[in-house]
Amino acid sequence: QSALTQPASVSGSPGQSITISCSGTYSDVGSHNLVSWYQQHPGNAPKLIIYEVTKRPSGVSYRFSGSKSGNTASLTISRLQAEDEADYYCCSYGGRSTWVFGGGTKLTAL
Amino acid sequence: QVQLVQSGAEVKKPGASVKVFCKASGYAFISYYIHWVRQAPGQGLEWLGRINPSGESTAYTQKFQGRVTFGRDTSTSAVYMELSSLRSEDTAVFYCARGGASYDLDYWGQGTVVTVSS
């Protein structure tokens, strides 16, 4: 299966909101409400920040939210903070016990 | 608390095989899948596959089918990933991650660096 499509980079100023898109196909993003998002700081393992498209694990800031429309999922970070600067990856269940990641988006806090 | 602890860094020659271990603790080992994810230097995350520690069923991404094998040892709550016929392009960090109930990857190991070099 092909990787999900994310923008290579996004940027925003502290206090602003940014949105990262994640485009797939009907076979993965479109067919399952099983999209998750991960935050990865340099040198660290990824961390789950959104699951089942919209849900936040315990301890994840309310500033992170997810949504989905058709074959495209989105991650929105509101009230951007310097510590949000990281790489972000979407991931979708693709059916038949397969998963697929997006290519990743580098978020720069200006 | 849930923890996944991986084995240490490896340096291998082209054509060799490598085995990376992932030891789980803090939860019922057989109740959750373990996924394996690869991250080449400066690149994104790539899903390799998953193993069900309960019955040892596996699923692999097509790209690595035939070259990667997952296994488990329930007595030690550990799983392993073996990658064969290594080439320089396999140089990467390999992560294990627990498969959450919501088809996510909710806890991750610290990563194991595998370097393939002659």
Image (spheres, rainbow, N blue to C red):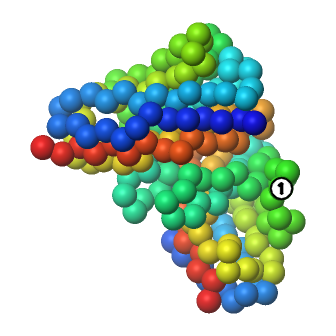
Front residue of B61/B23: it is B23
Res. B115 in view: yes
Q: How many marks?
A: 1
Q: Residues within 10 Å of mark 1 (few under 14, many from 20)?
A: few
Q: Residue at x 62, y 28 (%)?
A: B24
Res. B50 in view: no
Amino acid under disc 1 = Gly
In this picture, is B101 found above or below A1?
above
Q: Which residue is mark 1?
A: A59
Front residue of B63/A41: it is A41
Q: Secondary structure at mark 1?
A: loop
**Quarter location, residue B3:** top right
- Say left or right for B58 vs A32: left
The chain carrying label 1 is A
Q: How far across and how far down the image is residue A85, in percent?
A: 62, 74
Q: Residue at x 71, y 35 (%)?
A: B2
**Quarter location, residue B10:** top left
Q: How far across and how far down the image is residue B60, in percent?
A: 48, 29
Q: How far across and how far down the image is residue A50, in percent?
A: 76, 54
Q: How far across and how far down the image is residue B82, in percent?
A: 38, 26
Indicate the quadrant containing the N terminus of chain B: top left, top right, bottom left or bottom right: top right
In this picture, is B87 found above or below A97?
below
Indicate the quadrant containing the C terminus of chain B: top left, top right, bottom left or bottom right: top left
Q: Residue at x 74, y 26 (%)?
A: B27
- Say left or right for B38 vs A6: left
**Quarter location, residue A69:** bottom right
- Say left or right for B94 vs A91: left
Front residue of B42/B79: it is B79
In this picture, is A20 found above or below A43?
below
Front residue of A4/A12: it is A12
In this picture, is A87 found above or below B84?
below
- Say left or right for A4 vs B70: right
